[in-house]
Amino acid sequence: MLRVPMADLKSQYQPISEEMNEAVRAVLESGRFILGENVKSLEQEIAESGGAKHGIGVNSGTDAIWLALKALGIGPGDEVITTPFTFVATTEVIAQLGAVPVYADIDPVTFNLDPEKISARITERTRAILPVHLYGQPADIKRIEEIAERNNLKVVYDGAQAIGAQAYGKPIGAFGDAVTLSFFPTKNLGGAGDGGMILTNDDALAETLRAFRFHGSGGTYSYRYVGYCSRLDEIQAAVLRTKFPHLAAWNEARRKNAGKYRELLADLPITLPAESVFAKHVYHQFTIRCTERDTLREYLKAREIDTGVYYPSPLHVEEAYRYLGYKPGDLPEAERACREVLSLPVFPEMTDQQLAHTAASIRCFFEER
C-alpha cells in the first residue's frame, strides 16, 4: 500500500544535499559558530523578502515571541489578547513574562482570531494583541490593527506557520510591531534543529532585541538590560540559507497540492479550508473539518496515510492554564474546531500518486458509510 507521511524531510534534503553539506562543512572549518556571517546574511535575506527592515535570529520561534513581547515592555499584570486555538507557545510566553493571557474566540472559517471577539476582551490593563497566522493563512490584519490603533495596543503576529504568506499584497513582515517566525524542521522553511527570527520595521525595537538575545549586551562586557541567551547559530543559519532560495517554489507546490485537494474533495460532506480574499495562504497545513474526524483519521491510518490534529484541545481548558478561570463552553468556536479539524499531508514533495491516494481514500470512507 502507498505510504503517505505528513512530511518528508529526506526527500526535501536529497536534491540540495551537496550544497547543504558544503555549507555546514564551511561553518565547521571556519571555527565561527555564533552570530557569524551566515546569521547576518540570513537575517538580511529573510527581512528583505518578508517586508521588514530588520531580522533578528534567535534560538526558536517560542523565544522569538517571548523576546518580542519583552522588548515591547510587556510584563507583570499586563493583559495580552490571543487565541486559544494554536500551539501552546503563544500562551506560555505571556504567562512566563508575568502577564495575563486573555483569550478571544476564533473565526470558524479561517481558524484565526475573530476581530469581532477581540474588542469585547479589551480592558484598561490590555497592552497587546498576539494573533497567529494559523496554518499559513494571515489573520485579519487590517481589522486587528484598526482595533489596536484605537486602543493604543501593540501587535505581535506569530507567523511561525506563515513564512512567505502575504496580506493585502504585502509580505506578513510589513505589519504590526513585530512578526515572529519559527524554523522548526517541519515548518515551510525548516532548519536541522530549532531556530527562529523576529521581523520588525522599528529601528529602536530591533536594537533592543539584538541586545536582549545576547545577555542584554551589544557584544561587549557591558550590559544595558537584564538579558537572555537566545542566538540562532551559524550551522542552522547555513542550513536555512541553503533552503531559503527554494521557499517560494515549495510554497507554490503546497498551494498546488491544496488546489488538487479542492478539486478531488469538493462534493464530500467535509469543510475545506477557506482562503481569505486579502491573503495569500501558504498551506503549512491543509486542514479540513469533519464531524466524524476521529473515525476518518483511523480509516486513513489503516491505509498508511498520516494525518494531524492541530489542535486536539483548546488552551483555555488545559490544566496548566486553568488558573485563568475559563471553563468549557466559554470559547465555543475554538472548542468545536478542536473536535473537527484534521490536517492532511500537503508537503511540497508529495507525489500526485500520494495525493490521489489520500483523496480517494477519503472518498471511499464516505461511500462506505
Image (cartoon, rainbow, N blue to C red):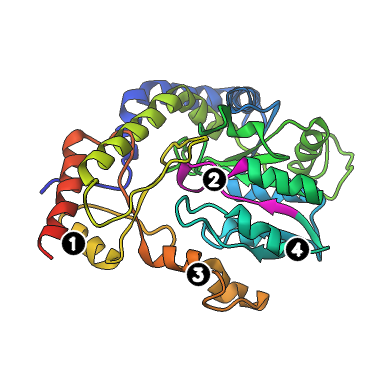
> Could you classify mark 4 by the number of other residues whose Cα lies within 10 Å: few (under 14), some (14-19), or many (20 or more)?
many
| Residue 12 visible (yes or no) | yes
Dot 2 falls on a residue whose secondary structure is: loop
- Marks 1 & 2, CB-CB < 8 Å contact: no
Question: Does label 1 or label 4 sit earlier along the sequence?
Answer: 4
Residue 198 is drawn in which quadrant? top right
> What x and y, as percent, mark residue 99?
75, 63
Q: Is-magenta flag for residue 333?
A: no
| Inter-mark Cα distance, 4 to 3 | 24 Å
Q: Looking at the image, which is closer to me, 299 or 10? A: 299
Which residue does the image show at 70% across and 39% down from the upper left? 176
Determine whether 104 is above or below 23 in the image: below
Residue underneath mark 1:
299
Callout 3, which amino acid?
Pro
**Mark 3: which secondary structure?**
helix
Task: Give the residue pinned by disc 3.
Answer: 332
Distance between the Cα atoms at labels 3 and 1? 27 Å
Q: Position of residue 166 (x, y in %)?
A: 53, 32
Cα gap from disc 1 to disc 4, whole angstroms: 43 Å
Label 4 belongs to which residue? 99
- Residue 133's disc is 2
Q: CA distance from mark 1 to mark 2?
A: 30 Å
Question: What x and y, as percent, mark residue 236?
Answer: 53, 34
| Range of residues picked out in magenta | 128-141
Task: State how many labels appear.
Answer: 4
- Element under disc 1: helix
